[in-house]
Image: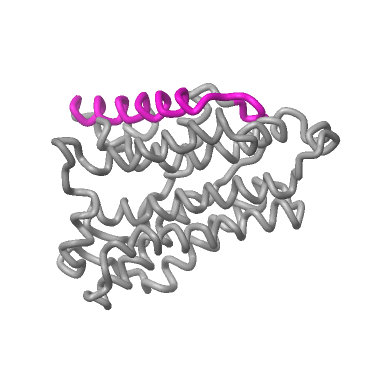
Amino acid sequence: MLLDASILNIVAIGEMMVILTGGIDLSVGSNLALTGMIVSMLYRDLHNLPVILAPILGIIIGGICGALNGLFVAKGRVIPIIATLSTMYIFRGLVYIISQGKWVNAHEMPEGYKLLTRVEVFGIPILIIYAFIVFLLFYYILNYKSIGRSIYAVGNNPQSSVYIGIDKTKVLFLVYLISGILSGLSGVLYTSRFASAESSAAVGFELSAISAVVIGGVKTTGGSGKIGGVVLGVLLLTMIVNGLNIMRISPFYKLALQ
């Protein structure tokens, strides 16, 4: 269950950062798919490319997508749901354009790329370790760094946060950048774990991430919520999906039950 929850956990933490400011990022699933497709195609065509670069490439590409959202919302003052709904369709469209609707299959991927998420460290799948590291990093940022307090302040009262000297534009840009980076990283992990990159990958993933954040106790209006609650929200959703699979519930009913 932890293994199944790992990628959603990483994306949900990025989504949480945005929701804490009172915003929303609907583009995380499309960002994941776009990044995963680009990196997979690079490794399909350039087999000599060092595998260690894959997560870095994912972070860069995802970060560019996140920065675009940040520019729209923080600088352009576009309403978050409009900005990220637009980029959701743009990113998804780009997936189809660059791939021409084709998949990158397992046999086209270097073995090292697939092993990124399939090795174990002291008996623990490395994908779980990745998710745990991301959790620890953002737990520390939100609880012990000034930027974490600034994120909560902007979400709690945007106008007052400006009066006490917080750069609201910088904070808003940063949270969308973080969300993009974590989605991009997840795109690489997703394609590595499932050994394929497809145009329709992670459709609806943004709704699962938002659900996990809200179930975890983060206020949709911003300013309140704990990262531990988000992790529990992810685990609850994963438990429901696994339980429905074990019960052999039809996939037509499964989505509705979720």
Which residue is at a point 50% across and 32% down the rendered structure image?
140
User: Residue 210: percent from the left, percent from the top?
Assistant: 51, 36
Q: Quadrant of residue 68?
A: bottom right
Q: Main SS type for the magenta part?
A: helix
Question: For this view, does 6 lie left or right of residue 168?
Answer: left
- Decide which of 98, 223 is in the foreground and name it: 223
- Decide which of 100, 221 is in the foreground and name it: 221
- Depicted 190 relative to depicted 231: above or below: below
Question: For this view, does 127 lie left or right of residue 181?
Answer: left
- Decide which of 5, 251 is in the foreground and name it: 5
Position of the N terminus by quadrant? top left
Q: Quadrant of residue 90?
A: bottom right
User: Residue 168: percent from the left, percent from the top?
Assistant: 75, 43
User: Residue 3: percent from the left, percent from the top?
Assistant: 25, 37
Q: Which residues are magenta?
A: 219-247
- Depicted 48 relative to depicted 186: above or below: below
Residue 24 lies in the magenta-colored region:
no
Q: Quadrant of residue 9?
A: top left
- Decide which of 95, 74 is in the foreground and name it: 74
Looking at the rendered structure, the number of numbered marks drawn on it comes to: 0
Which residue is at a point 52% across and 40% down the rendered structure image?
15
Residue 244 lies in the magenta-colored region:
yes
- Depicted 18 relative to depicted 103: above or below: above
Which residue is at a point 66% across and 28% down the rendered structure image?
223
User: Residue 30: percent from the left, percent from the top?
Assistant: 46, 55
Question: For this view, does 64 lie left or right of residue 76?
Answer: left
Position of the C terminus by quadrant? top left
Q: Which color scheme does this rendered protein use?
A: one colour
